[in-house]
């Protein structure tokens, strides 16, 4: 049952372009079918003013800090009472001016994706990101970190880096930042490709398990909570139900021509809620989506 006439939190995709080429990311692997775009700042402000979300996530399939107005976006949402969270490959903070902008933006949580403790391991997945610059940026940031900013070291566990988990955890502790282990998603693994090189040996650290020769989500399917709570506004203004819909297969409308209230109660949104109640195992991307599974291990 839908109890609200508007979503309570929002996701924004500031851009679907990236400076990196992570092999399992549709943007990094150049497999995103949506046109490259940067979210219009005026549109963004209009949506924040309409929805007044409690919480805003600034990521989808691209590097948020490539957007020229990203700091102003954080500020705008924070000034209107929203908690703000962003995930980044961390390439911008080696520049002091960006640290100051980040501090001034009022951002609440910065998720830094560092999947290894040396350049060789890190670059197996974060292709095209300069490991030394990321660490230098983190060190600079820590020198000036304001009390309102939470920094989380996010480490995606894969076969090639699982042996570095404890060292990374110890380093995070030494630096005084949170450490979060994320189970790798294979949603974007090309058909017929071998998942083995990405799956950790320790399957406790995976969101999947083997059923015979099939890789399946641990714990099976869970009800989808996104469709009654939030929306994803893509860089081109198209609106998707959630960050799992990378290619926009379930596009519900476009915020350039519709209000969020209209999209939230639209026929397409209601149909999706209905389909999800029937079975989410019959259509993409819901049939492989890990909503409700334990993603942080
Ligand atoms: C597509 S990224 C976009 C944000 C930013 N460019 C980044 O990498 O942090 C969105 C989130 O997915 C994470 N991610 C990337 N590849 C992943 C994978 N194969 N499995 C799970 N999470 C992944 C990223 O670290 C980030 O937290
Ligand atoms: S840094 Fe983020 S958006 Fe860029 S390719 Fe990697 S996962 Fe994708």
Image: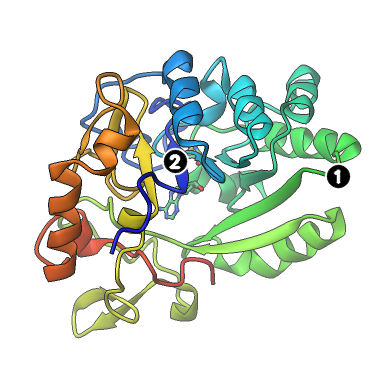
In this picture, residue 173 sits left or right of residue 130: right
Mark number, residue 11? 2
x, y percent for residue 60: 41, 39
Q: Is 150 rendered above or below residue 163?
A: above
Mark number, residue 147? 1
Residue lying at the far left of the rendered structure: 282
- Determine which quarter of the picture holds residue 76: top right
Residue beneath the point at 43% across and 61% down: 184
Q: Is 238 rendered above or below residue 207?
A: above
- Determine which quarter of the picture holds residue 99: top right
Mark 2 surroundings within 10 Å by alpha-carbon count, few (fewer than 14), some (14 through 19), many (20 or more): many
Q: Is 290 rendered above or below residue 118?
A: below
Residue lying at the far bottom of the rendered structure: 212
Q: Pick whichever, 244 or 84, lies toward us.
A: 84
Mark 1 secondary-structure assignment: loop
- Which quadrant, please, contains the C terminus? bottom right
- Determine which quarter of the picture holds residue 281: bottom left
First of labels 1, 2 by sequence position: 2
Counting every numbered tag in the picture gives: 2
Residue lying at the far right of the rendered structure: 143
Residue beneath the point at 38% across and 52% down: 4
Mark 2 secondary-structure assignment: strand
Mark 1 surroundings within 10 Å by alpha-carbon count, few (fewer than 14), some (14 through 19), many (20 or more): few
Q: Is 239 rendered above or below residue 85?
A: above
x, y percent for residue 24: 35, 48
x, y percent for residue 20: 47, 32
């Amino acid at each position: 049952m839908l109890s609200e006439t508007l979503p309570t939190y929002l996701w924004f995709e500031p851009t679907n372009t990236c400076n990196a080429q992570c092999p399992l990311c549709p943007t990094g692997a150049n497999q995103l079918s949506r046109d490259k775009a940067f979210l219009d700042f005026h549109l963004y402000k209009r949506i924040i003013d309409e929805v007044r979300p409690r919480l805003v996530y600034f990521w989808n399939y691209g590097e948020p800090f490539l957007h020229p107005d990203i700091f102003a976006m954080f500020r705008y949402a924070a000034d209107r009472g929203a908690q703000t969270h962003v995930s980044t490959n961390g390439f911008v903070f080696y520049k002091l001016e960006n640290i100051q902008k980040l501090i001034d933006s009022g951002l609440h949580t910065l998720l830094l994706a560092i999947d290894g403790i040396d350049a060789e391991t890190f670059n197996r997945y974060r292709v095209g990101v300069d490991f030394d610059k990321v660490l230098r940026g983190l060190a600079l940031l820590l020198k000036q970190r304001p009390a309102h900013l939470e920094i989380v070291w996010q480490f995606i566990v894969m076969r090639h880096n699982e042996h570095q988990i404890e060292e990374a955890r110890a380093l995070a502790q030494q630096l005084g930042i949170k450490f979060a282990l994320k189970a790798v998603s294979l949603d974007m693994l090309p058909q017929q490709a071998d998942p083995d090189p990405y799956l950790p040996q320790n399957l406790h650290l995976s969101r999947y398990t083997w059923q015979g020769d099939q890789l399946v989500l641990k714990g099976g399917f869970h009800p989808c909570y996104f469709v009654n709570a939030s929306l994803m506004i893509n860089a081109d203004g198209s609106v998707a139900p959630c960050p799992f819909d990378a290619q926009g297969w379930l596009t519900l409308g476009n915020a350039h021509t519709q209000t969020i209230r209209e999209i939230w109660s639209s026929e397409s949104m209601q149909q999706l809620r209905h389909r999800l109640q029937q079975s989410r195992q019959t259509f993409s991307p819901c049939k492989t989506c890990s909503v409700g599974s334990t993603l942080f291990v």
